[in-house]
Image (cartoon, rainbow, N blue to C red):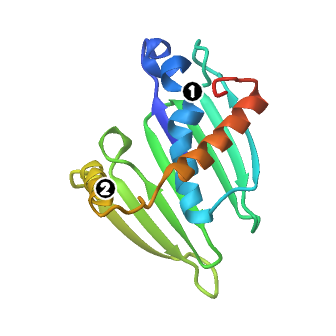
Amino acid sequence: GVYGITGRPGYEKEWRANSEISGGGELIDQGSHLIDLSRMFLGDFEEVNGLAHTFFWDMPVEDNGFMLLRNHKKQVAFLHASCTEWKNLFSMEIYGRGGKLDINGLGGSYGVENLTHYTMLPEMGPPLKNNWEYNKNDDSWSMEIQEFYKDIDLDRQPSVGLNDAYESIKIVEKIYKESGYDYIS
């Protein structure tokens, strides 16, 4: 998975470059979303390796975070969060033995949202391909808050909870420590 934003003049002076406001750099900003999505598909990760580093911007937080995560089944998530992209980018590929999902775009400057499903044929060769494009207005934020209100009204646990945030932050914290950053304590 890759989640990256394009820089702009003065980016190093924006809130994202101030760890007291942002909590860190790209790893906690966009990387945490990649971790959450990967955990949805693969579960908890037992092995965490990565690097957070500032390659481009003159700022005290990292502008790139790289993660290599493995679960107990040895399934791997390879993730990259960046604010040094040439254009805004969201891309996630999920591979299985018989197929692949390719997810791209977030709407707006990230491009039209696309889901492509590839099915491997028994004889291999070029796979079958189905593509869905979502180019309508994104109402996911509204749907998410309505679901949260429903959780409160029905006194039920949200489908995503504090433990999910905690597991994501544990991964971010480990990579920050290994990379020499001490944002989270």
Earlier residue among tags 1 and 2:
1
Query: What's the amino acid at mark 2?
Result: Ile
The residue nearer to you, when weighing 18 against 4, is 18
Q: Which mark is residue 106?
A: none
Residue sitting farthest toward the bottom? 122
Q: Position of residue 173 (x, y in %)?
A: 68, 35
Q: Position of residue 141 (x, y in %)?
A: 29, 48
Residue 152, which numbered label?
2
Of 110 and 177, which appears nearest the observer? 177
Depth check, front residue: 157 or 131: 157
Reply above or below: 86 against 43: above
What percent of the width, then of the height, locates residue 177? 75, 30
Q: What whole-number distance in Å separates the C-alpha atoms at marks 1 and 2?
A: 32 Å
Residue 150 spot, x, y in % from top left: 27, 60
**Residue 147, visible in the rendered structure:** yes
Going by the numbered disc 1, the residue's amino acid type is Gly
Specify the quadrant of the image occupied by residue 11.
top left
136 sits to left or right of 105 = left
Using the rendered image of the protein, determine whether residue 51 is visible from the camera's viewpoint.
no
Residues 144 and 51: in front is 144
Q: Which mark is residue 25?
A: 1
- Secondary element under disc 2, as helix, strand or loop, is helix
